[in-house]
Amino acid sequence: MLPAAPCGPLASVHTEAPQGRSPSLQALTPSRASGFLSPQRQALMILRQHSQGAESEAARLDEDEQLEDLVAQHKDVWEFHVLELRLTREIRALQRSQEQLRAEGTLVRARLQEVERRLRLAAEVGGDPVVTD
């Protein structure tokens, strides 16, 4: 048995387009819908790819900025290291100079003591002091 054709108020639902929609949308079949949606899907994919590209570009820029910061920090550390080496060399040179001055001071005191000893000896003998170098 075949279904009866709608009659009455329900009959217009199948034959007329709903209010606010065009008759062409009512005739949209699944194959037509996929054809209609395909460009939108492609556009959505392009937008997503563009968004991902922009995100990866932002990430790369962040990486570049971090790299620049690290390079600047490395440069600062290197400059500090060079200054530290220079200062270490200068300290060693000053320490050698100090040791040399101490040794010379010891020699000068020894000579002074020798001169004082000769002067006392000469004063005890009562004669002229003899100074030789």
Image: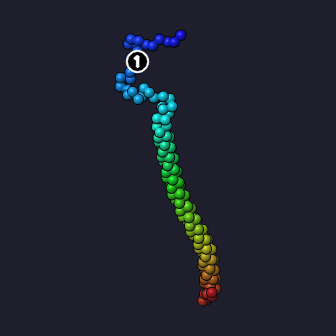
Residue at 42 percent of width and 28 percent of height: 25
Can you give x and y, in whole percent of width and height, for residue 44 in the image? 47, 39
133 vs 72: above or below: below
Q: Which of 124 and 13 is in front in this view?
A: 13
Of the pair 103 and 83, the residue shown nearer to us: 83
Residue 120 visible (yes or no): no
The mark tally for this picture is 1
Say which amino acid is labelled 1: Val
Residue depicted at x 50% and y 46%: 53
Residue extending furthest left? Answer: 20
Residue 131: x and y in percent read 61, 87
Q: In this view, does 64 lie above or below 100?
A: above
Image position, residue 75 (x, y; %) = 53, 60
Eyeballing the image, is 20 above or below 100?
Answer: above
Q: Residue at x 62, y 85 (%)?
A: 122
Left or right of residue 89: residue 69: left
Q: Quadrant of residue 91?
A: bottom right
Q: Which of 58 and 122 is in front in this view?
A: 58
Packing grade of label 1 (10 A; few <14, some 14-19, many >=20) is few
* Residue that mark 1 sits on: 13
* SS assignment at label 1: helix
In this view, 132 is above or below 21: below
Q: In this view, does 88 lie to the left or right of 39?
A: right
